[in-house]
Amino acid sequence: MKPSLKYKRILLKLSGEALMGAKDFGIDSATVDFIAKEIKKVVNMGAEVAVVIGGGNIFRGVEASVKGMERASADYMGMLATVINALALQNSLEKNNVPTRVQSAIDMREIAEPYIRRKAMRHLEKDRVVIFAAGTGNPYFTTDTAAALRAMEIGAEVIIKATKVDGVYSADPVKDPNAKKYDTISYMDVLRKGLNVMDSTAISLCMDNNLPIVVVNLRGKDNIKNVARGKKIGTIVGGHNGERAKKKGR
């Protein structure tokens, strides 16, 4: 008998830096394999999982634009970096016997499907993990915004933001030993305090649609599975956790 799920459909947001492991850049295969195994656990429980990955381990558009590159060109390069990461995660998932599809917001049919909302939802219903690559396909929008947008489009019940820390803190816990960890925090407080959860566009989109965000440590074993089951770990952003799912009758 499968354990009960609080969230049936999940959007997992991973930063590109998460794939580096202990490296300074690039992709660490052991870290990607760990992530794939954690995703497999929640898929085996019956959850439908979509993933959005950043590209900061390969290229960061905003930093490049600050150094003199045109912002639009830099952002397109960052989108291509997310496709590389998506293919790496797909390879690892399928090695672990998890059927996976990559959908790209930029057309590149030889390596990924074009993003089609209804097709993505059919994949999820057939227990395939769907990895959304190339952000929104538009410059000036981050992969945080892409994650929030795709979550709305597919009817996700929660965004799980997997990071290097175990929740949202009042300050950087690495630099400030007195930083306070929040168990729950409202969208407005995240915006008001300028906390580094997701960018302001993504937070506003989640707030407008009452979509909870759960921030957990990527390296914590069973963290993704435990969020899906409704266990209180990490930090919940949003005051009406789970209400969206009830309204939709899922």
Image (cartoon, grey):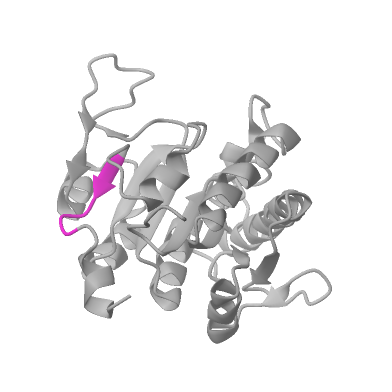
Residue 78: percent from left, percent from top: 63, 55
Residue found at the far top of this picture: 177
Q: Nearer the viewer, residue 123 or 198?
A: 123
Magenta span = 235-240
Q: Nearer the viewer, residue 178 or 7?
A: 7
Residue found at the far bottom of this picture: 118
In the rendered view, tell whether residue 99 sits above or below residue 95. Answer: below
- Quadrant housing the C terminus: bottom left
Residue 121: percent from left, percent from top: 53, 78
Residue 209 can be seen in this image: no
In the rendered view, tell whether residue 106 sits above or below residue 218. Answer: below
Residue 76 can be seen in this image: yes
Residue 182: percent from left, percent from top: 21, 34
- Horizontally, residue 246 falls left or right of residue 64, namely left
Q: Nearer the viewer, residue 61 or 5?
A: 5
The residue at the point 74 percent across, 37 percent down is: 29
Residue found at the far front of this picture: 1
In the rendered view, tell whether residue 164 sits above or below residue 119. Answer: above
In the rendered view, tell whether residue 37 sits above or below residue 210. Answer: above
- Horizontally, residue 155 falls left or right of residue 76, namely left
The residue at the point 36 percent across, 60 percent down is: 7
The residue at the point 48 percent across, 65 percent down is: 146
Residue 116: percent from left, percent from top: 59, 83
Q: Quadrant of residue 240?
A: bottom left
Q: Quadrant of residue 203?
A: bottom left
Q: Is residue 152 magenta?
A: no
Q: Quadrant of residue 183?
A: top left
Count of marks placed on residues: 0
